């Protein structure tokens, strides 16, 4: 094929792509969001920071958006889905650890006692995670999570846990990406638990997934180097841990951040106190019928201080009311 | 302006850009590298992993290249440039720390005793860095490094330290970037010391700069959140720390890695033991006249095991001989 022909085909392809972009822009980028103040706020924010020559323009390299995961991108009730995985791991390993039947937090895990596991500021949950998700290489951990996701079903919806991601948030991720934002997950969840599925489910590459970290050592497996995760946390990526990790991993302050609990308070403060246009958004769980309804008194997704701060800083913070603002919650509702 | 006109101008622009790419491809992407086996090896590697449909093709998302910094992207003699900064900080702060005049490692810093500071596996250097670079917020640290870079001069070349980057490596970074690689720095140097200048000098964004980390706390400064670096290391990003950080920050195994010392051994092993085509390269300091000459017996840039491993694994490792392979070492030689 001659170069001339090749180039003309390239131009054809580009022409088609250009037409595609034009038509996509005129369509609603957030179809699962009800029209109203919240959606308008998000769209206005994105327009203002991407309008070249405008007063709020932000260059592409600084378009950083960070997202909490549990309760922000997918559900987290009746308990963090990762806790369900740790319970699964406990059951799988108890044969070689008979002492777990009478020791906490393992006993609570074997009894599916979610209340105990999520008490004490999540300490039993963390201890369970370190014990049951540590001791594996990164490769082994991903294989274990992959296996579990295939068979595990959410107790209320009887669906794979990855079905319980929020359709409006998937659209928001895609909308920001189309506007050349870099989307990051900044979650309290275990880094490698998330990386085992989040790239596929959210389209976020592994280098943009930040979570809590277990201590890790370089070891040899079958004569080749491998990375072994120890049974001890190195860093808990929650509350003040979030801005610290954002600095460490990203090195730039986000211009937009999305969370749903007081564990996201510092990330939202860090984001919204930067100069220029900023957006801090809280996903408020107000929909008992389609999802769950909880905030100030909840053990999981405790939302109290951050809700007050959102009310005080309406120019930079916004609250997404799931019941009011979302047409659908889960992708599977669209198939109905 | 009508849409038709706009589109035709766009096509014109694209046509010009396409021609531009064609002409750039025919030009030598590595003009400061002498023709020979090393250059050919690098070019062949890049061609084979970027040839669509070829047996060694690697998709863009997996084109990760990692670079050590000291001795790989810029010089590191007579001592790591960051050590020079820590000495500068010691002198600046000694007024309020009179005890430093008689305590190590501060005494050695005040006496410019580089031998003592780089002895003991670098422990005095690390202690000095923690004491003199900790206690500042990230913003303050960047300001201090920026100030220092303006006035400090390298003792041999009497030039700013950032003049002592390697021209052939700048070309290599650009060549890989043009081939849609993501270049990362993975260095033992302090994360924020590097971020203060490396984005400007190498064109590598902050989220792709990985270094040693000081413990960090979220604090308030003038009523706003700030990040305070403590006077204690959280993680030393050297030797086995490099593959561990690569996993933590990038989440993918590099397909190419560049280092110059035994501190890079594990990064090179981690990179070259992955499946598919891989390249591990060592910058060997062989040019006493233009730069320095050192390897197996050097306290700084100690290169012993990695040199042996390169000799054993010639199919995946290569050694860059500075004297033989580089036409010029520093960018300022080009202006002569």
Image (cartoon, coloured by chain):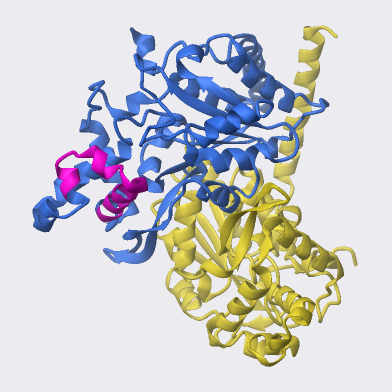
Chain colours: A blue, B yellow
Residue B59 visible? The answer is no
> Taking B24 as reference, is A307 above or below it?
above
Q: Which residue is the extreme one toward the bottom?
A: B102
User: Going 58% across and 15% down the picture, which residue do you hit?
Assistant: A29
Looking at the picture, tell me which residue is in the foreground, B149 or B158. B149
Q: Predominant secondary structure in magenta?
A: helix
Residue at the image point whose x is 68% and y is 93% from the top: B102
Q: Residue at (72%, 31%) from the top-left corner?
A: A277
Whether the magenta-drawn stretch holds residue A130 is answered as yes
Q: Residue at (29%, 53%) from the top-left corner?
A: A127
Q: How many marks?
A: 0
Residue B274 is inside the magenta segment: no
Q: From the top left corner, tell me how far across and down residue A231 is, in percent.
A: 30, 59
Q: Tell me if A171 is positioned left or right of A287 in this view.
A: right
Residue A64 is situated, as x and y percent measured from the top left of the image, at: 62, 37
Q: Is residue A48 visible?
A: yes
The picture places residue B127, in percent across and down from the top left corner, at: 59, 78
Determine whether A159 is above or below B333 in the image: above
Per the rendered image, the range of residues in magenta is: A107-131
Q: Residue furthest right?
A: B336
Of residue B168 and residue B47, the one placed in the foreground of this image is B168
Tell whether B220 sits left or right of A125: right
| Res B281 → quadrant | bottom right
Q: Is residue B91 left or right of residue A131?
A: right
Q: Nearer the viewer, residue A85 or A285?
A: A285
């Amino acid at each position: 094929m001659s170069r001339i022909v090749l180039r003309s085909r390239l131009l054809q392809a580009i022409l088609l792509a250009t037409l595609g972009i034009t038509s996509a822009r005129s369509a609603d980028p957030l179809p699962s969001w009800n029209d109203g103040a919240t959606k308008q706020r998000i769209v206005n924010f994105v327009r203002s920071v991407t309008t070249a020559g405008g007063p709020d323009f932000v260059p592409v390299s600084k378009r950083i958006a960070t997202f909490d995961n549990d309760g922000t991108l997918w559900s987290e009730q009746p308990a963090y889905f990762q806790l369900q995985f740790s319970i699964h791991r406990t059951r799988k390993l108890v044969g070689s650890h008979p002492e777990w039947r009478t020791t906490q937090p393992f006993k609570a895990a074997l009894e599916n006692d979610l209340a105990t596991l999520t008490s004490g500021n999540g300490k039993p949950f963390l201890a369970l995670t370190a014990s049951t998700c540590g001791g594996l290489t990164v490769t082994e951990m991903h294989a274990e999570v992959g296996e579990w996701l295939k068979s595990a079903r959410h107790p209320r919806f009887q669906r794979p846990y990855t079905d319980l991601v929020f359709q409006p948030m998937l659209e928001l991720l895609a909308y920001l990406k189309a506007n050349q934002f870099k989307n990051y997950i900044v979650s309290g969840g275990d880094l490698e638990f998330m990386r085992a599925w989040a790239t596929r489910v959210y389209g976020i590459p592994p280098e943009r997934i930040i979570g809590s970290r277990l201590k890790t050592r370089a070891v040899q497996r079958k004569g080749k180097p491998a990375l072994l995760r120890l049974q001890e946390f190195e860093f808990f990526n929650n509350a003040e841990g979030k801005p610290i990790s954002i600095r460490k991993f990203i090195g730039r302050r986000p211009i937009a951040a999305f969370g749903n609990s007081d564990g996201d308070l510092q990330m939202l403060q860090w984001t919204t106190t930067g100069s220029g246009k900023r957006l801090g958004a809280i996903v408020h769980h107000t929909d008992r019928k389609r999802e769950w309804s909880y905030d100030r008194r909840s053990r999981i997704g405790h939302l109290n201080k951050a809700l007050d701060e959102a009310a005080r800083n309406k120019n930079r913070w916004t609250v997404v009311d799931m019941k009011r603002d979302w047409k659908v919650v889960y992708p599977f509702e669209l198939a109905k």
